[in-house]
Image (cartoon, helix red, strand yellow):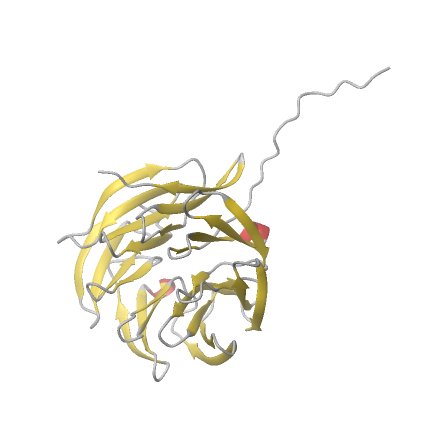
Amino acid sequence: MHLVPAPPQPVPIISRFDYVAVDAARRRVYAAHTGSQALLVVNADSGAVLGQVDVGPLHGVAVNPATGTVYTGDGTNGTVSEVNPRSLEVVRIVNLGKPIDAIAYDATRGRIYADEDSGNHLFVIDARSFRLLRTIITPGNDHEYLAVDPADGMLYQNIPDLNEFVVINPSTLRIVDVVHTPELTDDHPLQFDSRRGTVIVGGKNRRISIYDRSGRRLATGSMPSDVDQCSLDEGTGFVACAGAGRVWVVNVRSTVPHVVATLLVGGRAHTVAVDPATHDLWTVLVTPRGDEVQRIRLRP
Protein backbone atom coordinates (compact mmCIF):
# COMPACT_ATOMS: atom_id res chain seq x y z
CA MET A 1 0.00 0.00 0.00
CA HIS A 2 1.32 3.43 -0.81
CA LEU A 3 0.14 7.00 -0.92
CA VAL A 4 -0.27 8.74 -4.29
CA PRO A 5 -0.36 12.52 -4.05
CA ALA A 6 -2.25 14.63 -6.55
CA PRO A 7 -0.43 17.64 -8.02
CA PRO A 8 -0.35 20.46 -5.48
CA GLN A 9 -2.57 23.43 -6.24
CA PRO A 10 -1.79 27.04 -5.45
CA VAL A 11 -3.83 28.54 -2.63
CA PRO A 12 -4.84 32.14 -3.38
CA ILE A 13 -3.65 34.72 -0.89
CA ILE A 14 -6.30 37.40 -0.98
CA SER A 15 -4.96 40.14 1.19
CA ARG A 16 -5.28 43.92 1.12
CA PHE A 17 -3.06 46.91 0.52
CA ASP A 18 -3.54 50.60 1.20
CA TYR A 19 -1.28 53.65 0.83
CA VAL A 20 2.18 53.57 -0.78
CA ALA A 21 5.05 56.03 -0.22
CA VAL A 22 8.50 56.41 -1.82
CA ASP A 23 11.72 57.56 -0.14
CA ALA A 24 13.59 58.69 -3.27
CA ALA A 25 16.79 59.63 -1.41
CA ARG A 26 17.24 56.22 0.19
CA ARG A 27 15.68 54.27 -2.68
CA ARG A 28 12.90 52.62 -0.76
CA VAL A 29 9.22 51.99 -1.43
CA TYR A 30 6.88 51.47 1.52
CA ALA A 31 3.42 49.95 1.21
CA ALA A 32 0.72 49.44 3.80
CA HIS A 33 0.18 45.68 3.58
CA THR A 34 -3.03 45.91 5.55
CA GLY A 35 -4.05 42.27 5.11
CA SER A 36 -0.72 41.12 6.57
CA GLN A 37 -0.79 43.86 9.24
CA ALA A 38 2.71 44.82 8.17
CA LEU A 39 4.68 47.57 6.44
CA LEU A 40 6.14 46.23 3.20
CA VAL A 41 9.67 47.47 2.39
CA VAL A 42 10.90 47.34 -1.22
CA ASN A 43 14.16 48.33 -2.94
CA ALA A 44 13.20 51.11 -5.38
CA ASP A 45 16.05 50.25 -7.77
CA SER A 46 15.83 46.46 -8.00
CA GLY A 47 12.20 45.98 -7.01
CA ALA A 48 13.25 43.33 -4.48
CA VAL A 49 11.20 42.91 -1.32
CA LEU A 50 13.49 43.66 1.63
CA GLY A 51 11.13 42.69 4.42
CA GLN A 52 7.99 43.51 6.36
CA VAL A 53 7.54 45.19 9.72
CA ASP A 54 4.72 44.07 12.00
CA VAL A 55 2.87 47.25 12.90
CA GLY A 56 -0.77 46.15 12.96
CA PRO A 57 -3.56 46.74 10.41
CA LEU A 58 -2.04 49.88 8.93
CA HIS A 59 -3.41 52.19 6.23
CA GLY A 60 -1.51 55.48 5.93
CA VAL A 61 2.25 55.69 5.30
CA ALA A 62 4.47 58.79 5.36
CA VAL A 63 8.25 59.34 5.28
CA ASN A 64 10.41 61.90 7.06
CA PRO A 65 12.66 63.01 4.16
CA ALA A 66 15.45 64.21 6.47
CA THR A 67 15.91 60.96 8.39
CA GLY A 68 14.10 58.30 6.36
CA THR A 69 11.94 57.45 9.37
CA VAL A 70 8.57 55.99 8.38
CA TYR A 71 5.25 56.72 10.06
CA THR A 72 2.20 54.48 9.77
CA GLY A 73 -1.45 54.99 10.63
CA ASP A 74 -2.66 51.78 12.12
CA GLY A 75 -6.31 51.11 11.35
CA THR A 76 -8.27 49.27 13.99
CA ASN A 77 -5.48 49.58 16.55
CA GLY A 78 -6.07 53.33 16.63
CA THR A 79 -2.36 54.13 16.73
CA VAL A 80 0.40 55.86 14.80
CA SER A 81 3.75 54.08 14.75
CA GLU A 82 7.31 55.24 14.10
CA VAL A 83 9.29 52.66 12.15
CA ASN A 84 13.08 52.40 11.76
CA PRO A 85 13.44 51.19 8.16
CA ARG A 86 17.02 50.05 8.66
CA SER A 87 16.39 47.75 11.62
CA LEU A 88 12.84 46.95 10.40
CA GLU A 89 11.31 47.52 13.81
CA VAL A 90 8.74 49.73 15.47
CA VAL A 91 10.42 52.36 17.64
CA ARG A 92 7.53 54.30 19.19
CA ILE A 93 3.73 54.22 19.23
CA VAL A 94 1.14 56.83 20.15
CA ASN A 95 -2.35 55.59 20.95
CA LEU A 96 -5.11 57.81 19.57
CA GLY A 97 -8.14 55.68 20.37
CA LYS A 98 -9.66 55.96 16.88
CA PRO A 99 -9.08 53.98 13.67
CA ILE A 100 -6.51 55.79 11.52
CA ASP A 101 -6.54 56.04 7.73
CA ALA A 102 -4.36 58.49 5.76
CA ILE A 103 -1.45 60.38 7.33
CA ALA A 104 0.82 63.21 6.17
CA TYR A 105 4.15 64.53 7.45
CA ASP A 106 4.96 68.24 7.73
CA ALA A 107 8.75 68.38 7.38
CA THR A 108 9.01 72.07 8.36
CA ARG A 109 7.18 71.72 11.66
CA GLY A 110 8.00 68.10 12.42
CA ARG A 111 4.35 67.10 12.67
CA ILE A 112 2.32 64.09 11.69
CA TYR A 113 -1.30 64.60 10.68
CA ALA A 114 -3.48 61.50 11.06
CA ASP A 115 -7.04 61.02 9.82
CA GLU A 116 -9.71 59.18 11.71
CA ASP A 117 -11.16 56.58 9.37
CA SER A 118 -14.94 57.04 8.98
CA GLY A 119 -15.02 59.81 11.56
CA ASN A 120 -14.35 63.51 12.06
CA HIS A 121 -11.20 63.56 14.21
CA LEU A 122 -7.92 64.80 12.72
CA PHE A 123 -4.98 64.19 15.04
CA VAL A 124 -1.84 66.34 15.17
CA ILE A 125 1.24 64.57 16.55
CA ASP A 126 4.62 66.05 17.40
CA ALA A 127 7.16 63.79 15.66
CA ARG A 128 9.95 64.68 18.09
CA SER A 129 8.19 63.83 21.36
CA PHE A 130 5.72 61.48 19.65
CA ARG A 131 2.87 62.96 21.63
CA LEU A 132 -0.55 64.20 20.60
CA LEU A 133 -0.58 67.99 20.22
CA ARG A 134 -4.16 68.65 19.18
CA THR A 135 -7.33 66.99 17.96
CA ILE A 136 -9.18 68.92 15.26
CA ILE A 137 -12.87 68.26 14.66
CA THR A 138 -13.73 68.49 10.97
CA PRO A 139 -17.06 68.63 9.13
CA GLY A 140 -18.69 65.44 7.91
CA ASN A 141 -18.06 61.91 9.11
CA ASP A 142 -15.33 60.69 6.82
CA HIS A 143 -11.78 61.53 5.71
CA GLU A 144 -9.89 60.40 2.66
CA TYR A 145 -6.61 62.10 1.82
CA LEU A 146 -4.66 65.12 3.03
CA ALA A 147 -1.68 67.15 1.85
CA VAL A 148 0.60 69.88 3.23
CA ASP A 149 1.67 73.03 1.38
CA PRO A 150 5.44 73.14 2.08
CA ALA A 151 5.55 76.91 1.57
CA ASP A 152 3.22 77.93 4.40
CA GLY A 153 2.28 74.64 6.05
CA MET A 154 -1.42 74.94 5.26
CA LEU A 155 -3.10 71.55 5.46
CA TYR A 156 -5.70 70.44 2.90
CA GLN A 157 -8.06 67.66 4.00
CA ASN A 158 -10.60 65.87 1.79
CA ILE A 159 -14.11 65.34 3.23
CA PRO A 160 -15.66 62.83 0.78
CA ASP A 161 -19.10 62.50 2.34
CA LEU A 162 -19.68 66.26 1.91
CA ASN A 163 -17.89 66.66 -1.45
CA GLU A 164 -15.52 69.30 -0.10
CA PHE A 165 -12.09 69.87 1.35
CA VAL A 166 -11.08 72.00 4.31
CA VAL A 167 -8.03 74.19 4.83
CA ILE A 168 -6.30 74.17 8.22
CA ASN A 169 -3.90 76.85 9.46
CA PRO A 170 -0.76 75.22 10.97
CA SER A 171 -0.26 78.03 13.49
CA THR A 172 -3.72 77.96 15.04
CA LEU A 173 -4.59 74.38 14.01
CA ARG A 174 -8.04 75.61 13.11
CA ILE A 175 -10.10 75.30 9.95
CA VAL A 176 -9.88 78.59 8.06
CA ASP A 177 -11.73 77.66 4.87
CA VAL A 178 -14.17 75.11 3.53
CA VAL A 179 -14.02 74.60 -0.25
CA HIS A 180 -17.07 72.97 -1.79
CA THR A 181 -16.51 70.82 -4.88
CA PRO A 182 -20.03 70.34 -6.32
CA GLU A 183 -18.66 69.04 -9.62
CA LEU A 184 -17.13 66.03 -7.79
CA THR A 185 -18.76 63.09 -6.05
CA ASP A 186 -17.16 61.17 -3.17
CA ASP A 187 -13.85 63.07 -3.29
CA HIS A 188 -10.96 60.68 -2.79
CA PRO A 189 -7.51 61.68 -4.09
CA LEU A 190 -6.02 65.02 -3.06
CA GLN A 191 -2.55 66.33 -3.92
CA PHE A 192 -0.83 69.69 -3.53
CA ASP A 193 1.27 70.99 -6.43
CA SER A 194 3.86 73.22 -4.77
CA ARG A 195 5.23 74.46 -8.10
CA ARG A 196 1.85 75.85 -9.11
CA GLY A 197 0.35 76.44 -5.67
CA THR A 198 -2.69 74.36 -6.58
CA VAL A 199 -4.82 71.67 -4.98
CA ILE A 200 -5.65 68.66 -7.15
CA VAL A 201 -8.76 66.77 -6.10
CA GLY A 202 -10.66 63.96 -7.81
CA GLY A 203 -14.05 62.34 -7.41
CA LYS A 204 -15.51 58.91 -8.01
CA ASN A 205 -17.70 60.42 -10.75
CA ARG A 206 -14.84 60.49 -13.31
CA ARG A 207 -13.93 64.13 -12.71
CA ILE A 208 -10.73 65.79 -11.51
CA SER A 209 -10.38 69.47 -10.61
CA ILE A 210 -7.65 72.00 -9.94
CA TYR A 211 -8.11 74.71 -7.28
CA ASP A 212 -5.85 77.57 -6.26
CA ARG A 213 -4.93 78.44 -2.67
CA SER A 214 -7.94 80.74 -2.35
CA GLY A 215 -10.36 77.91 -3.15
CA ARG A 216 -11.12 79.11 -6.68
CA ARG A 217 -11.65 76.33 -9.20
CA LEU A 218 -9.29 76.74 -12.15
CA ALA A 219 -10.14 73.72 -14.30
CA THR A 220 -11.99 70.41 -14.37
CA GLY A 221 -11.27 67.43 -16.59
CA SER A 222 -12.28 63.81 -17.07
CA MET A 223 -10.61 60.63 -15.91
CA PRO A 224 -11.64 56.97 -15.48
CA SER A 225 -14.18 55.96 -12.86
CA ASP A 226 -13.55 54.45 -9.44
CA VAL A 227 -10.45 56.50 -8.69
CA ASP A 228 -9.13 55.81 -5.23
CA GLN A 229 -5.63 57.18 -4.67
CA CYS A 230 -3.34 59.42 -6.70
CA SER A 231 0.26 60.62 -6.51
CA LEU A 232 1.70 63.79 -8.06
CA ASP A 233 5.01 63.89 -9.91
CA GLU A 234 5.99 67.54 -9.51
CA GLY A 235 8.82 67.14 -11.99
CA THR A 236 6.54 66.22 -14.89
CA GLY A 237 3.21 67.70 -13.83
CA PHE A 238 1.56 64.30 -14.14
CA VAL A 239 -0.67 62.70 -11.55
CA ALA A 240 -0.72 58.90 -11.38
CA CYS A 241 -3.99 57.39 -10.15
CA ALA A 242 -5.28 53.91 -9.45
CA GLY A 243 -8.62 52.21 -9.03
CA ALA A 244 -10.65 49.25 -10.28
CA GLY A 245 -7.53 47.32 -11.30
CA ARG A 246 -6.15 50.09 -13.48
CA VAL A 247 -3.42 52.70 -13.29
CA TRP A 248 -3.67 55.88 -15.32
CA VAL A 249 -1.76 59.13 -15.69
CA VAL A 250 -3.35 62.59 -15.89
CA ASN A 251 -1.67 65.78 -17.10
CA VAL A 252 -2.79 68.33 -14.50
CA ARG A 253 -0.77 71.28 -15.79
CA SER A 254 -2.54 71.50 -19.12
CA THR A 255 -5.41 73.93 -19.67
CA VAL A 256 -7.84 71.08 -19.06
CA PRO A 257 -6.66 68.02 -17.07
CA HIS A 258 -6.72 64.95 -19.29
CA VAL A 259 -5.60 61.32 -19.28
CA VAL A 260 -2.37 60.63 -21.19
CA ALA A 261 -1.92 56.91 -20.44
CA THR A 262 -3.88 53.98 -19.00
CA LEU A 263 -2.75 50.49 -18.01
CA LEU A 264 -4.84 47.49 -16.98
CA VAL A 265 -2.83 45.72 -14.28
CA GLY A 266 -3.10 42.05 -13.40
CA GLY A 267 -4.88 42.35 -10.11
CA ARG A 268 -6.95 44.48 -7.78
CA ALA A 269 -5.07 47.77 -7.49
CA HIS A 270 -6.31 51.01 -5.98
CA THR A 271 -3.15 52.73 -4.77
CA VAL A 272 -0.06 54.16 -6.44
CA ALA A 273 2.98 56.32 -5.62
CA VAL A 274 5.47 58.19 -7.81
CA ASP A 275 9.23 57.99 -7.39
CA PRO A 276 10.27 61.63 -7.99
CA ALA A 277 13.87 60.62 -8.78
CA THR A 278 13.04 58.26 -11.67
CA HIS A 279 9.37 59.17 -12.37
CA ASP A 280 8.51 55.49 -12.02
CA LEU A 281 5.11 54.50 -10.62
CA TRP A 282 4.74 51.90 -7.89
CA THR A 283 1.55 49.99 -7.23
CA VAL A 284 0.57 46.98 -5.13
CA LEU A 285 -1.76 44.26 -6.34
CA VAL A 286 -4.00 41.58 -4.92
CA THR A 287 -4.20 38.68 -7.40
CA PRO A 288 -5.27 35.00 -7.32
CA ARG A 289 -1.54 34.23 -7.36
CA GLY A 290 -0.97 36.22 -4.21
CA ASP A 291 0.03 39.77 -3.34
CA GLU A 292 2.47 41.65 -5.55
CA VAL A 293 4.33 44.93 -5.83
CA GLN A 294 4.96 46.32 -9.32
CA ARG A 295 6.98 49.12 -10.88
CA ILE A 296 5.49 50.85 -13.93
CA ARG A 297 7.44 53.11 -16.25
CA LEU A 298 5.85 55.83 -18.34
CA ARG A 299 7.36 56.07 -21.80
CA PRO A 300 6.55 58.42 -24.73
Left or right, 172 with respect to 69, comes to left
- Up the image or down, 80 lies above or below 44; here it is below
Can you tell which quarter of the image residue 140 is in?
bottom left
Front residue (pair 55, 224)? 55
Q: Quadrant location of the N terminus?
A: top right
Q: Which residue is the extreme one toward the right?
A: 1
Q: Is residue 299 visible?
A: yes
Q: Position of residue 212 (x, y in %)?
A: 20, 67
Q: Quadrant of residue 147?
A: bottom left
Identify which residue is drawn at 50% across, 63% down.
Answer: 72
Please say whether residue 203 is visible from this viewpoint: no
Q: In this view, does 217 lie above or below 172?
A: above
Q: From this viewpoint, which residue is outermost toward the bottom?
A: 172
Instruction: List x then y, in percent, for residue 19.
Output: 44, 55
Residue shown at the point (38%, 57%) measured from the top left? 25
- Residue 100 lies, in percent from the top left, at 50, 65
Residue 229 versus residue 82 in the image, above or below:
above
Q: How many labels does the image show?
A: 0
Residue 178 locus on image (x, y percent):
29, 73
Residue drawn at x 56%, y 52% is 52
Say left or right for 154 vs 96. left
Return the residue found at the far left.
Answer: 255
- Against 115, residue 224 (above or below) is above
Quarter of the rendering occupied by the C terminus: top left
Residue at 54 percent across and 66 percent down: it is 81
